[in-house]
Image (cartoon, rainbow, N blue to C red):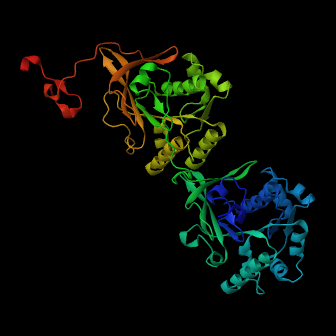
Amino acid sequence: MNERDLVRTGIYGLDEILLGGIAKGNVILVEGITGTGKTLFGLEFIYRGITKFREPGLVVAFEATPSKIIRDAEGLGWNLEQLEKEGQLKIIFTSPQVLIHELTSPASLLLETAAEIGAKRIFIDGINLLRGAGEDGFNSDNEFRLSLQRLIEGLTRGDLTPVISHEVVTEHPSAITSPIAEFLADTIIHLRREHRDNGLQRTLEIVKSRGQDYDAGRHSLAIVNKKGLQVFRRVQLPLRVNAPQPSSFDADSAVGIPALDELLGGGIYRGAATVLCGVSGVGKTILGMQLLLEGALKLGQKGLLVSLDEHPAQIQRNARTLGLEWEKALEHGMIHVFHESPQELEINSHFDRIRQVIESNNVQRLVIDGMTSYSTALGDQRVYRDFFYTLVGLVKQRLMIGFFSYENPEVFGITHFMPEFPVSSIVDNILVLNFVELGNTLRRSLTIAKTRGRNNQFVTREFSIGPGGISMPSDSAEPLPQLPFSRYYGLLSRAPTRISPDLK
């Protein structure tokens, strides 16, 4: 649909879900139980219309007085009183009976007021009160429908884009929308407020919107102080990409360790997703940090470290202990750190913030430190899987280098990489970090289990962590002779034993 045929709400994230905005001429119905944000939705629709799109508007209220509306809006940083003084906004406090009369009267003062300020938008708060606008104090369903029809016809006369709110009594599926209003409204947006564990979760769902496509399903909704409503697209939806999937033929050095680049077949392709798999303490975080430092200080590529486990101050302390130039990269804006507590993690808003940091800073290297923490925090493995898919899709879309560290609980020997869902087919590279017991000491080892599109070496190398971070000396020793399978037994165990020469 052409952009000129759309009305943008200006609400953060909502127009993206609506694929640009709401079709012009549509009557917008916002429904939900008490406390879901219906009034804020309507007020922000008017406020953003004035301040972002130069479209003056009207607010019609039946219960809340103009002074209360102005007071509540101030808490979100919206100065409605100033907009009224400038003649861009008019708040009208009236009754449903008077509103219906005004919109149907040939000489409507309300429509005259709208014309005087050049209003393009109108918000009517609480059309459920029209049921009490009858002569006997209560309208039947037919009378309620007729009142709504007269209301919509009057708004059409004034060439106004209307948002009308309707309060439902229950969140039961059969009461998602008013049976009458759903036939008359063109766009229906349902707001929910639900308990999750002991917390609270808000969602927004577009039930229908005539004349356009949109992202279906429940999206996350937040009411943010000094900002207003924020809508976050659900991660289960694939990334919206118009261009064909890009593919890089350029391989960058992974962490500036020649021996590791040699194992990887020369480096890592841009757009490749790599899993660092290993037990806790083996060095996954340090390897991820060196990946970012290599890109930032040597190649001029900005990086982002995302962590649920470690606070940025703790990460900085660890880097200082190892003598890494972490603070230098932070000060020059070459590396960014994003930390959020895993407690009551809201994954849709979390991913949106990650995406915003990446896009606003042109991040080219991404490290997610601790995918295991996401698995624990989310609980729902399907949501976790979809989140992982979306992250990998973002890496490929933007041709970044992405590292995802995963803690494998197996200390010695590995029977699987990630138990939650098959990851080996999703990612391009898998690096297995492990401990090797030699005598009474533990040594660290690294094996390239998989590289996509590279001629990697299937060998295990030792590495160490010390001043300067991770080091891996080149293995200059003579390679062991490659014997045929006939010289081994126990091949299916993946740890075959060589047949003794004496047995031959």
Which residue is found at the position 76% from the left and 87% from the top?
136
- Pinpoint residue 327: horizontal percent, then vertical percent: 63, 22
Q: Image check: 232 left or right of 70?
A: left
Q: Position of residue 120 (x, y in %)?
A: 81, 66
Question: Is 152 placed left or right of 395 in the picture?
Answer: right
Q: How many marks?
A: 0
- Viewer-nearest residue: 285 or 192: 285
Instruction: Name the spot of residue 84 as percent of width and height, x first.
Output: 89, 60
Task: Give the image location of residue 264, x and y in percent.
Answer: 41, 28
Residue 314 shows in this picture: no
Q: Residue furthest right?
A: 85
Toward the front, the furthest residue is 249
Which residue is drawn at the image coordinates 32% and 24% (left, top)? 459
Decide if residue 10 is in sight here. yes
Depth check, front residue: 373 or 356? 356
Whether 94 is drawn above or below 351: the answer is: below
* Residue 101, quarter of the rendered image: bottom right
Q: Quadrant of residue 170?
A: bottom right
Quadrant in which the C terminus appears: top left
Pick the residue in front: 409 or 114. Answer: 114
Quadrant for the N terminus, please: bottom right
Could you say which quadrant of the image residue 262 lies in? top left
Q: Residue at x 67, y 74 (%)?
A: 185
